[in-house]
Image (cartoon, grey):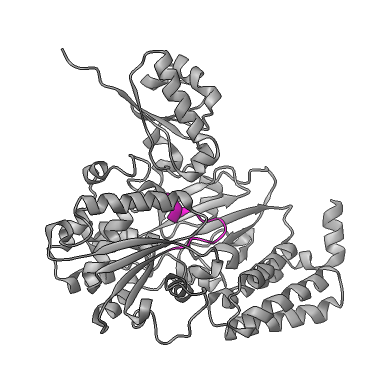
């Protein structure tokens, strides 16, 4: 007589799902199963990235994993009545999870495991191919690992798009008594959440990528710098690191090899500027987060003056697959000089916000219209800001822009971390331009005059333009100020703040014209 198998029900433990009631849903499912004397195991998985459907509850049935979207605790008794444990139909049913069009049309490489299992189960991670990249890395010479990353075409996913392998090559050949691997998990751009989703949903992937990086460049110590606003990610990573140590993947003799790698985690200082790599290093050293002059580059003199890799979460998380499948496998995705996949984060005034991982080359319009379903308000689309608060505002005629670094640069835009924020026709782009300048003024580290003083003066100038005071003269002054900030700022905060301002002026000039603004308000 065979033992009855418990039915697995998956309820995300991701912060986005928790914010809309996932904890209550999980408790309600456990309670309802007990009342009905049903054998149910609730697995707290990571998010699939369909944030428009959270809490997304999945059931392992004869049909496969079936999904139910936007479940509330009040819906749970009705789900049981509708035989959802067998994949039964319900008004919240989304069908077999893998067949949901939003998910099925993606090319998930980095996020292939996210949402499948308990993120803190190292057995589940290994069962789904985890640590295969590390296993292959341990059969290669360190310089061969670096060249695999170079050949893959992987570029930094943190915003700058610098070739990851070239950074690693520099650190490998640099002289130093101690080398470091630092993960920049200070994800502060508006409309971005991919780092958080991965840290909360597949933390061992990031850990594996950092171990491989350490072996490749001769680093025996690493740090993950997590933004202070991510307590769930911090807690999950801390637990995952302890589990990795317990299972022999960290510390002396990594996975039974001759290599050693220690990993620790630090909570950020709550400053946007600490997303810039040199300010991050200052903060890691216990100092105020202020930009460093360059040269020397962090790859030569980074953390504590030693050669240091500083990579974004998504860059490091792409490495295990590259080592497992080979550089050419990864390079075959994408277009031009943008290889592999980009985890795109769709947010703002859009019907279906969430994470979409696609090969570079899909257009901005396809993401917004086909994945996002247009604006949530139902009003006409007017603009999309891509690349965080320092990204340009793209009008409808730019929706044909492919998502790749060079295409965005050609249109005076910034692909950045892959965040897209959508606006309908009720948006006031003059106000948005002012917000960009004010954001820079608030978040500036204060080290350089163009950023510290320029952003403050910029807010004042835009205020005068909005008020209709000497419009032409102030617009000319604003243009000169933006040029100065771009050319003379020490880092990207001051240097890129003009992007949203200049794009708003170029594509939406009517919003800076007081009579036109009055007319729009009346409409």
Can residue 198 be seen from the camera position used here? no
Q: Magenta residues? A: 185-197
x, y percentage for residue 35? 43, 14
In the rendered structure, the answer to whether residue 228 lies left or right of residue 435 reads left
Give the total of numbered labels: 0
Q: Where 85 falls versus 278 (above or below)?
A: above
x, y percentage for residue 383? 65, 58
Q: Is residue 195 magenta?
A: yes
Say which residue appears at 46% left-offset and 14% top-offset: 81
Q: On the image, which quarter does residue 305 sit in?
A: bottom left
Give the camera-side residue of 359 and 288: 288
Say which residue appears at 48% left-offset and 24% top-offset: 28
Q: Is residue 485 magenta?
A: no
Say which residue appears at 22% left-offset and 42% top-offset: 127
Can residue 413 be seen from the camera position used here? yes
x, y percentage for residue 505? 71, 70
Q: On the image, which quarter does residue 313 sit in?
A: bottom left
């Amino acid at each position: 007589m065979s033992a009855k198998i418990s039915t697995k029900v998956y309820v995300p433990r991701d912060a986005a799902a928790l914010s809309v009631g996932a904890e209550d849903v999980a408790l309600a499912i456990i309670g309802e199963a007990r009342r009905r004397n049903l054998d149910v195991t609730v697995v707290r998985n990571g998010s699939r990235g369909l944030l428009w459907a959270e809490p997304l509850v999945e059931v392992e049935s004869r049909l496969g994993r079936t999904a139910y979207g936007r479940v509330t605790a009040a819906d749970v008794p009705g789900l049981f009545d509708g035989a959802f444990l067998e994949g039964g139909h319900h008004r919240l049913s989304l069908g077999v999870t893998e067949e949901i069009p939003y998910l099925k049309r993606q090319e998930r490489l980095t996020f292939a495991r996210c949402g499948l299992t308990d993120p803190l189960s190292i057995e589940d991670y290994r069962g789904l191919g985890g640590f295969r990249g590390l296993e292959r890395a341990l059969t290669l010479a360190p310089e061969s690992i670096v060249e695999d990353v170079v050949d893959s075409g992987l570029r930094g996913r943190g915003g700058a798009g610098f070739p990851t392998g070239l950074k690693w090559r520099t650190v490998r050949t640099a002289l130093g008594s101690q080398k470091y691997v630092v993960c920049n998990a200070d994800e502060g751009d508006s409309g971005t959440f991919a780092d958080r989703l991965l840290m909360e949903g597949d933390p061992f992937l990031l850990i594996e990528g950092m171990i491989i990086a350490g072996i490749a460049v001769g680093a025996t110590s690493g740090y993950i710098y997590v933004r202070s606003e991510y307590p769930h990610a911090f807690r999950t990573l801390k637990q995952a690191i302890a589990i990795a140590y317990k299972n022999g993947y960290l510390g002396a003799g990594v996975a039974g090899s001759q290599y050693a790698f220690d990993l620790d985690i630090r909570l950020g200082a709550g400053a946007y500027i600490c997303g810039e790599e040199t300010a991050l290093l200052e903060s890691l050293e216990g100092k105020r987060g202020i930009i460093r002059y360059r040269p020397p580059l962090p790859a030569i003199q980074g953390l504590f003056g030693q050669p240091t890799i500083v990579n974004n979460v998504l860059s490091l998380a792409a490495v295990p697959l590259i080592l497992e499948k080979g550089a050419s496998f990864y390079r075959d995705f994408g277009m031009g000089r943008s290889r592999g996949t980009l985890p795109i984060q769709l947010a703002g005034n859009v019907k279906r916000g969430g994470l979409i991982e696609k090969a570079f080359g899909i257009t901005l319009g396809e993401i917004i219209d086909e994945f996002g379903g247009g604006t949530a308000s139902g009003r006409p689309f007017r603009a999309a800001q891509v690349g965080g608060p320092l990204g340009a505002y793209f009008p409808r005629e730019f929706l044909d822009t492919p998502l790749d670094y060079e295409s965005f640069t050609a249109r005076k835009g910034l692909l950045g971390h892959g965040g897209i924020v959508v606006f309908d026709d009720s948006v006031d782009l003059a106000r948005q331009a002012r917000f960009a300048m004010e954001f820079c003024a608030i978040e500036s580290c204060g080290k350089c005059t163009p950023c510290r003083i320029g952003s403050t003066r910029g807010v004042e100038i835009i205020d005068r333009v909005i008020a209709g005071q000497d419009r032409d003269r102030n617009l000319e002054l604003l243009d000169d100020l933006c040029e100065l900030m771009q050319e003379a700022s020490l880092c990207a905060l001051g240097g890129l703040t003009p992007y949203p301002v200049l794009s708003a002026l170029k594509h939406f000039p009517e919003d800076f014209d007081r009579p036109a603004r009055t007319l729009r308000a009346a409409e």
